[in-house]
Image (tube, grey):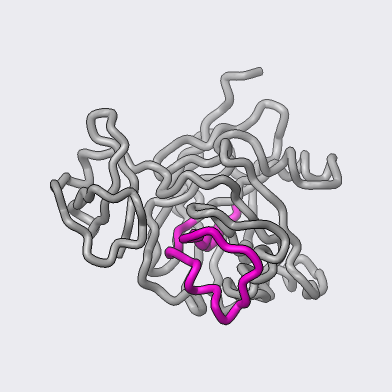
Amino acid sequence: MKFLRFSDGGRVLCGFTDGEKVFQVESDHYLLEDPEVISEHNMGDVKILPPVSPSKVICVGLNYRDHAAELGMDIPDEPVIFLKPPTAVIGHGDAIVYPAMSSEVDHEVELAAVISERVRCVDSEEADEFIAGYTVLNDVTARDLQRRDGQWTRAKSFDTFCPIGPFIETDIRPSNLDISLELNGVLRQSSSTSNMIFTVQELVEFISEIMTLEPGDIIATGTPPGVGEMKPGDTVRATVEGVGTLENRVESSDIQ
């Protein structure tokens, strides 16, 4: 089931979709076993919003074997994590704003897990019980600022630097899914989640031993090879098989 948040006439609504229709439900929760539909909308008539409003976005660096090989880096012994602020989150169709202080902004397609309920210190064997589903994420990065700072906070945290969506797919196994990204229709990233170094479940265990995970929190599971630059005017399409395609356009900042 593909859960989404959307707006119609200025109201924030929730529901699920079959691709053509949006079926509005009363509940704003994404664990919908037998939802009661209260109205239908045409997909083209609504604005898709970010599928969740997370308290935090936890990202994982270097989690694909083929990406490590591309960079000539050793496989890490444990996950390397960092945070994106919730103010960076935008939805499908929203604009990625190219900040004036950067001259090298990169795309990074990722599979993202959505946490379903509050959890702390969960074993990997039980982690699936706390995952509502999966969505697509673009870990937009100001690469020049990342190199300059020697750490990642500024480079990863600009407003609009965390597109997610369009949906939360609640019925899929993430272990062997094609993952790709197109820039202006040209394939730039392509791999499979089978190349992950740490599984989603292992990441949930590792992160939940550090911090409490809240409902709606996002765990971005790393990017495959082919990371590269975007420029104002570009259109980027990030796809995870069975989960969805997230499309955003890059625009120049009006703040100089």
Magenta residues span: 108-136
Q: Identify the residue shown where x is 32% and y is 56%.
A: 3
For the C terminus, the quadrant is top right
User: Can see residue 237?
Assistant: yes
Q: Identify the residue shown where x is 33% and y is 51%.
A: 4
For the N terminus, the quadrant is bottom left
**Rendering coords of residue 207 (x, y %):** 67, 63
Q: Identify the residue shown where x is 73% and y is 67%.
A: 79
User: Can see residue 182?
Assistant: no
Residue 59, placed above or below residue 65: above
Q: Nearer the viewer, residue 203 or 141?
A: 203
Q: Nearer the viewer, residue 112 or 97?
A: 112
Instruction: Specify the quadrant of the image occupied by residue 62.
Output: bottom right
Q: Which residue lies most toward the bottom here? A: 125
**Rendering coords of residue 77 (x, y %):** 80, 75
Residue 11, placed above or below residue 1: above
Q: Identify the residue shown where x is 36% and y is 57%.
A: 30
Q: Is residue 239 left or right of residue 146?
A: left
Q: Is residue 189 left or right of residue 94?
A: right
Residue 249 drawn in magenta: no
Q: Is residue 95 left or right of residue 47?
A: right
Number of marks in the rendered image: 0
Q: Nearer the viewer, residue 147 or 153?
A: 153
